[in-house]
Amino acid sequence: MKNKKIIKTLGIIALVIVTALATRIFTMQQVFGSDKDFSKIIVLEKYLKEYYLYNKDIKDEDLEAGQLKGLVAGLKDPYSQYLTKDEMTKLSEQTTGKFQGIGVIISPHEDGTVTVVSPIKGSPAEKAGIESGDKILKINGEDFSGEKINEASEAIRGEAGSEVSILLLKNDSKTTKEVKVKRQEIKLDSIIKGKIGDIGYIGIIMFDQDTGADFKKALNELTKEGVKGLVLDLRGNPGGVVDAAVEIGDAILPKSDFCTLKNNKNEIIESYKTDDKYNDIKMVVLVNEGSASASEILSGAIKDLNRAKIIGQKTYGKGVVQNVIKFPKGDGLKLTTSEYFTPSGDSINKVGVEPDIEVKLNENAKGIGIEHKEEDNQLQKALEVLKN
């Protein structure tokens, strides 16, 4: 009798649980309705506004932006994003080379982290020891993931003179390190020109809308000064405007295919070519793991056409191109629409450009470029190759 009573009690409990569960399901059915063609977005928005604890803080523009961001995020492409009006403005700043912050290029990585593509040469980020491949874990004590790349960028930016604290997972040692960096007005000259003895030096920081013209001016000036060779430094160059890379390629490469863009149907949508008028100065090219996108297009074409030796370390491996569409209200969409291929037909995406001569930068080097020529062993190797 006692066992039967226990079984009966358990049965009642089970019935209560099932009833409660059925009640919850029935409630959700009421929320979403029985029509299979209903819009979940509309219903969810209505439900949030009615039952969310902090519904008074809900803004329609935030909900709309969240919906659009989520739609594009569903592609799981780290380079495609819906951009708010403010984010579109910041993207425009990158193509003109003027902004406030610490001077670091970041990107969402496939492992879900915020990853440093490269610090800008001479920037507060570079001086603080932030390097390509470092992972940004926290900004001012707040956690950030690759899904919040725009929020991370916003947190890093700020008024000149203010300070930002960044917790890094260092790429070389796999240990954490906290750095405090003072923000400043970043005014970029995309070209650095100089001479080391009778060898010319041109460093390209990034490709903005004026880089092609600036490069040709610097090259012509060095040629008139009688330099016997040229070091083209693309290390730490995160890319930028593709047309600028094409313009530079036309100035230093013989008549040939430069690069080809193909869409999702494997159709050629753009084929860039160089003409037969070019400067044939003896040249070497420096690259590293921070050389990405447009700098890989340029270095890949130079390597394929045997125009110069590539020295340094394998490049980042971003071989896809994004189109930016601006909407009437100022917001927009950045969407991966094509992949580029070198003159030999190779794709660089997730592969990178392998150097002809691999040289790892010395660990004790405080910087790279002409101002650090005494400790920059990659630059020293480039000069050695040119002289020999």
Image (cartoon, rainbow, N blue to C red):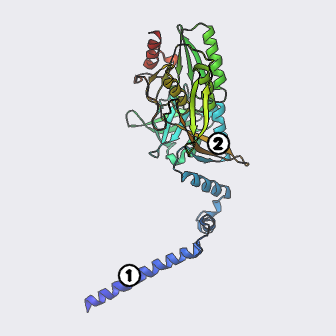
Return the residue nearer the eye: 121 or 82.
82
**Which image quarter holds the N terminus?**
bottom left
Q: Residues within 10 Å of mark 1 (few under 14, many from 20)?
A: few
**Residue 79 falls left or right of residue 10:** right
**Residue 130 falls left or right of residue 156:** left
Q: Looking at the picture, does residue 219 appear above or below residue 118? A: above
Return the residue nearer the eye: 148 or 329.
329
| Amino acid at circle 1 | Ala
Q: Is residue 34 visible?
A: yes
**Which image quarter holds the C terminus?**
top left
In primary-sequence order, the first of circles 1 and 2 is: 1
| Distance of label 1 from label 2 (alpha carbons) | 57 Å
**Exactly how many numbered labels are in the figure?**
2
Q: Residues within 10 Å of mark 2 (few under 14, many from 20)?
A: some
Q: Looking at the picture, does residue 307 appear above or below residue 333? A: above
Q: Mark 1: which secondary structure? A: helix
At horizontal 40% and vertical 84% (from top left) the residue drawn is: 15
Give residue 29's position: percent from left, percent from top: 55, 75
Return the residue found at the far bottom.
Answer: 1
Give residue 278's position: percent from left, percent from top: 61, 17
Return the residue nearer the eye: 187 or 223.
223
Which quarter of the figure has residue 312?
top left
Q: Identify the residue under disc 2.
A: 324
Which quarter of the figure has residue 9?
bottom left
Give residue 105's position: percent from left, percent from top: 54, 35
- Checking the image for residue 14, the label placed there is 1
| Amino acid at circle 2 | Val
Give residue 150's position: percent from left, percent from top: 57, 45
